[in-house]
């Protein structure tokens, strides 16, 4: 029979000598280790047939060593014998290791007999977790040992319950203890962590710092801790972790206690907070532009009309070629100015999208085809499953993709390609994946990517700011509003837009639009956003009154109608005096005969200044529509408007009445 390779693990030299003497006398080849860490090194050099291990040892103890052996596939059939000096005081700990034989440390004579018996069981292949402890005869419980075990268990419970990871390293930087939180951070089983070098479990640059730090401790007597701070954490998989390593002198060497704390969630929250603050700052800038746009667009258009007329007259009467050339350049600049003023109106809070169901792929494909036709740029558009029909303002969304395409053309210099993909995503999952403040719910996601030079990371957060541009300013250069308009339009639709620089180069614009899925059946009105609210509609056209009534009733509102301003004011006054005032009133500004919406609004405001009035007109460019706040209106709607616009009005100005009222 071949020699039996036995490994003896015990921190007591006396016990090691006794076991070595007995085992060698039985024909075994014996190797010895003073603790579990040294035993792992022995096992790595040569796999033993049988292991005799003490239970309580420094560094890696017998319980941990047994756990590693029983949970390492190539070691599972090793015959394991536990020698316990605390068998009486901690019977359960001795047995739960799952050893083939458990022996209590007693007299040398008793131990020799039980060691020989264990060898005999090994030779006869009598395996299986022992349920009994051999050699308890003649032993007595020791109170001091019991108290020490209680103290150890208390320490183990504290370490197990800590949310911070705690590791103990020996003087070589190898892990001899790791609590549950540390194992979670390493994302490895305990059998893989114990005995491993901490430096090898971390990224290469961090590992090199740790190795260099450990190598300086003894030669230089440098017992300063090594800290990876919150501002410069280490990466452990997808986690960001702070690490504080403290060397502790012990006899002629030292050990290290390490505290690991996962700060990933806090970092993610701070990143999201910074992104929200940037978005808030951007919205504040847009609000300022909204106020300006609402106040000056009308006056600007009047002035531009005068200037345009005089320019045309000057070109008509002038016979000087140089003068006509200058007038022509002025006319071009004036045309750009007119377009810019028109763009301003998209920033106004009072400019509500006129929504209808839009097939995004068809809309984007048409725009790309027409804008790219005179260039050398090609495009590729893909959709995931069904092409979503989204409630959007097609004119505004068309402007978004015209601006994006023009930007891409200018960036690529009429040569390159554009890729567009459309799919559906969950907002919460997408926000977690990207770290962007993406709204919750089901969304249509559009990725618009060009092959241009891309955008420098230093300015990527500024591209949506008003008047920011990487292009030269001038009469026919960048106005710095293209992406600002894109941002404003997307916000008006309840979505989000952000820009990234993909690894393959170019610029990628990500756009998200809410997918509004209409409900069906009798429960629609009960769950409608305007449930229980009272609305008054005044229009001199019967068909308009009928259509408006149906649209508001679709969202749960109670609707009253009036054919004239006089009728509307009388109905408004009656309901107010009855204590049942209207929550919202739509007033037509132009009626054929009788009081119009302007006068009706003035009188209603006199009765109840807090009333919400909405101006309605077929002339969206009129002064009353542009400056509707001056006439007691909270918003203005241009005819015709869709049911999605009605929903926007309800969500903006009305809240459903609680069901118990």
Image (cartoon, helix red, strand yellow):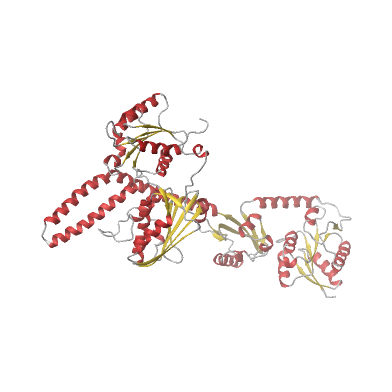
Q: Looking at the image, which residue sits at the far top?
A: 577
| Image point (21%, 49%), residue name | 304
Tell me where residue 318 appears, x and y as whole percent. Answer: 11, 57
Q: Is residue 90 visible?
A: no
User: In the displayed structure, would residue 393 be above or below residue 654?
Assistant: below
Tell me where residue 509 appears, x and y as whole percent. Answer: 42, 58
Q: Is residue 190 visible?
A: yes
Q: In the drawing, does residue 403 fall left or right of residue 593?
A: right
The quarter of the rendered structure image containing the N terminus is: bottom right
User: In the displayed structure, would residue 528 be above or below residue 54?
Assistant: above
Which residue is more in the foreground, 52 or 481?
Answer: 481
User: In the displayed structure, would residue 562 be above or below residue 473?
Assistant: above
Which residue is more in the foreground, 588 or 81?
Answer: 588
Q: Looking at the image, which residue sits at the far bottom?
A: 2
| Image point (45%, 53%), residue name | 512
| Image point (69%, 62%), residue name | 191
Which residue is more in the foreground, 451 or 62?
Answer: 451
Tell me where residue 587 appears, x and y as whole percent. Answer: 34, 35
Q: Answer with the quarter of the image where residue 238 lies.
A: bottom right
């Amino acid at each position: 029979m071949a020699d039996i390779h036995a490994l003896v693990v015990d921190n007591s030299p006396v016990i090691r000598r006794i076991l070595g003497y007995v085992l060698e006398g039985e024909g075994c080849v014996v190797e010895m280790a003073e603790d579990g860490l040294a035993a792992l090194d022995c096992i790595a050099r040569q796999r033993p047939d049988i292991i005799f291990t003490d239970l309580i040892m420094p560094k890696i103890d017998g319980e941990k060593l047994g756990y590693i052996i029983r949970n390492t596939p190539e070691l599972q059939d090793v015959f394991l014998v536990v020698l316990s000096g605390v068998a009486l005081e901690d019977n359960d700990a001795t047995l739960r290791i799952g050893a083939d034989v458990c022996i209590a440390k007693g007299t040398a004579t008793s131990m020799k007999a039980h060691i020989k018996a264990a060898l005999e069981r090994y030779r006869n292949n009598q395996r299986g977790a022992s349920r009994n402890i051999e050699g308890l005869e003649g032993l007595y419980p020791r109170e001091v040992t019991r108290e020490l075990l209680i103290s150890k268990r208390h320490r183990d419970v504290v370490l197990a319950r800590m949310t911070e990871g705690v590791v103990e390293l020996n003087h070589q930087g190898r892990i001899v203890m790791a609590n549950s939180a540390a194992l979670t951070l390493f994302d490895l089983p305990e059998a893989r962590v114990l005995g491993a070098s901490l430096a090898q479990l971390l990224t290469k640059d961090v590992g090199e710092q740790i190795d260099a730090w450990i190598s300086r401790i003894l030669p230089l007597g440098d017992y300063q801790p090594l800290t990876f701070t919150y501002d410069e954490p280490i990466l452990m998989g997808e986690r960001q972790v702070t690490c504080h390593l403290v060397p502790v002198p012990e006899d002629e060497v030292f050990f290290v206690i390490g505290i690991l704390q996962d700060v990933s969630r806090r970092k993610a929250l701070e990143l999201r907070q910074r992104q929200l603050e940037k978005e808030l700052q951007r919205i504040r800038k847009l609000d300022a532009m909204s106020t300006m746009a609402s106040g000056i667009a009308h006056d600007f258009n009047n002035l531009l009309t005068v200037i345009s007329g005089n320019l045309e007259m000057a070109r008509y009467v002038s016979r000087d070629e140089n003068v006509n050339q200058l007038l022509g350049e002025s006319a071009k600049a004036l045309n750009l100015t007119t377009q810019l003023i028109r763009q301003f109106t998209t920033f106004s809070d009072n400019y509500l999208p006129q929504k209808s169901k839009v097939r995004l792929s068809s809309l984007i494909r048409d725009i790309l085809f027409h804008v790219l036709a005179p260039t050398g740029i090609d495009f590729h558009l893909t959709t995931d499953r069904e092409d979503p029909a989204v409630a959007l303002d097609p004119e505004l969304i068309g402007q978004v993709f015209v601006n994006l395409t023009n930007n891409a053309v200018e960036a690529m210099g009429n040569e390159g390609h554009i890729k567009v993909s459309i799919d559906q995503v969950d907002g919460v999952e997408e926000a977690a994946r990207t770290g962007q403040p993406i709204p919750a719910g089901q969304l249509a996601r559009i990725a618009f990517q060009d092959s241009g030079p891309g955008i420098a990371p230093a300015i990527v957060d500024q591209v949506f700011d008003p008047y920011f541009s990487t292009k030269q300013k001038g009469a026919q250069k960048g106005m710095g509003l293209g992406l600002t308009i894109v941002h404003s339009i997307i916000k008006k639709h309840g979505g989000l837009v952000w820009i990234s620089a993909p690894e393959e180069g170019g610029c990628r614009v990500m756009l998200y639009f809410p997918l509004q899925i209409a409900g069906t059946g009798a429960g629609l009105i009960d769950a409608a956003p305007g449930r229980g609210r009272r609305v008054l509609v005044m229009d001199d056209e019967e068909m308009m009154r009928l259509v408006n009534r149906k649209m508001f009733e679709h969202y749960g509102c109670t609707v009253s109608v009036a054919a004239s301003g006089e009728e509307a004011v009388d109905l408004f006054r009656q309901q107010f005096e009855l204590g049942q005032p209207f929550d919202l009133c739509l007033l037509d500004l132009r009626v054929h005969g009788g009081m119009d919406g302007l006068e009706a609004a003035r009188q209603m405001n006199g009765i109840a200044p807090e009333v919400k009035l909405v101006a309605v007109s077929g002339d969206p460019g009129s002064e009353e529509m542009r400056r509707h706040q001056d006439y007691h209106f909270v918003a203005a709607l241009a005819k015709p408007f869709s049911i999605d616009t009605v929903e926007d009005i309800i969500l903006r100005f009305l809240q459903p009445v609680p069901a118990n009222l």
